[in-house]
Image (spheres, grey):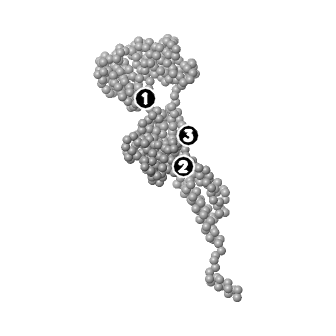
Amino acid sequence: MERTCLQLLLLSTLVYCSLGQGGASLSIHPDRSQFSEYESVSLSCEVQGNSAGWRVVRNTERGILSECNTDWGKQQGSSCIVSLILSDSGMYWCESGSGEHSNAVNITVHDRSPPASLSVSPDRCQFSEYESVSLSCEVQGNSAEWRVVRNTSRGILSECNTDWGKQQGSSCNVSLIPSDSGVYWCLSGSGEHSNAVHITVPVGAVILESPALPVTEGDSVTLRCRYQGTPSDLTADFYKDGSLIRTETTGEMTIPAVSKSDEGLYKCTNSVGESPESWMTVTDLSLSDLSLLASLIVSPDRSQFFEYESVSLSCEVQGNSAGWRVVRNSERRNLSECNTDWGKQQGSSCIVSLITSDSGVYWCESGSGEHSNAVNITVHDAGPTPIPSPAVPVLSMSLPRLLCSLLVGSPYLLVTIILLVKCCRSRTQGETRIPRKTHQDQLGDHVEEE
């Protein structure tokens, strides 16, 4: 009987282990979740069995759900290679064609600000001959040893105050001629660099006035087609990446709120001539300033909890909140929504009394598939749970040690083991109990005594 109880106990453990193991796991190289901008990361799906149909997907902090090799990442064999930028922050996991999920990993990309930035005044990258421009190095910390340098279109590398420009305090002032066209940046004595700006001084009479420094999504930007260094009322055609996008009789074009799609190579033409091309860079909004259709609100506002604590999750939606619900991808790779096998819907909130298996990624999702930000919630074990002393001798202390990690990870397994122990104890006691004598046995005893 003791052997049978042990077999049942081990069988339940094996069943738990088999249920707890998913079909795939997301592998990250290098193995970390915090990265700086412009670093590269390799993501791959390690699958038990046939890996066909599995792909890496993500839900960014902007609420965009997509898979590798669409508008992000590059599929190379079985790996997805991502050159990271700030907007790549989010939750990543593997997903099969049949909807199975791997573990999810929260990847955060931090801004890698250069130690200095080149400031251009006025803020544009095309100038007419004899116009003046002021270039200065804005440095975080000590600005000593920083100077403005350039590499002209003639391939000559030099610094301000040599054969070009005049140093005035922290600024380098340049009265421009066509040979001053080139790339300008700040350089420290130790070789550190700032951002670079391409300044063009065309020989022709027409220039495009566009921002030299990156503009932020949502900003209003005006592009002007200038003639002889002054604004012109000549009708101008504006081109982006070689294609005509607008014709303006005023000679200027305004983009009320620029987006990432407005980034590109611009030029203008009018009846006098054609400007050189200039690149306009559009940077993403800071992730904290993003405006999403919905946001997941967590109360209390934290991502780390102990077992048996309660958390309230709600979707704050811009406009009609109908059709939005809280969903999750747990660490057991189960994708589900509140009020199914976890959580309780109370009004617009989902109340969850947490256990360790509730650890996972939570977000809001609409009926049309739109997503909010994602939050990774981790539930820690509240502490060791007292386990009744086993009555069956075969349960020596070595077995609890062997199963310790599993007991901590699953209260359900713990309950199963306790019930099995009680079952075995009752059956063992039943087998060792002295049988009650029947009436015939008592009669036989009486005959023997006579």
Q: Which mark is residue 309?
A: 2
Label 3 Cα crowd, 10 Å radius (few <14 / some 14-19 / many 20+): few
Going by the numbered disc 2, the residue's amino acid type is Glu
Place residue 289 in its image quadrant.
top left
Residue at far front of view: 347
Place residue 133 in its image quadrant.
top left
SS class, disc 2: loop
Residue at far right of view: 449
First in residue order: circle 1 vs circle 2: 1
For the point 67% across and 57% down, the residue is: 397
Q: How many numbered markers are drawn? A: 3
Q: Position of residue 166 (x, y in %)?
A: 49, 12
Label 1 Cα crowd, 10 Å radius (few <14 / some 14-19 / many 20+): some
| Quadrant including the N terminus | bottom right
Q: Position of residue 270 (x, y in %)?
A: 31, 19
SS class, disc 3: loop
Residue 10 vs residue 334, the one in the foreground: 334
Mark 1 or 2: the one toward you: 2
Label 2 Cα crowd, 10 Å radius (few <14 / some 14-19 / many 20+): few
Q: According to the image, label 1 marks what residue? A: 216
Mark 1 and mark 3: Cα distance apart in space: 32 Å
First in residue order: circle 3 vs circle 2: 3
Are the residues at dot 3 and dot 2 in contact (C-beta closer than 8 Å)?
no
Q: According to the image, label 3 marks what residue? A: 31
Place residue 229 in its image quadrant.
top left
Position of 422 with respect to 88 (left or right) is right
Going by the numbered disc 1, the residue's amino acid type is Thr
Are the residues at dot 1 and dot 2 in contact (C-beta closer than 8 Å)?
no
Residue 71 vs residue 319, the one in the foreground: 319
Mark 3 or 2: the one toward you: 2
Mark 1 and mark 2: Cα distance apart in space: 41 Å
Going by the numbered disc 3, the residue's amino acid type is Asp
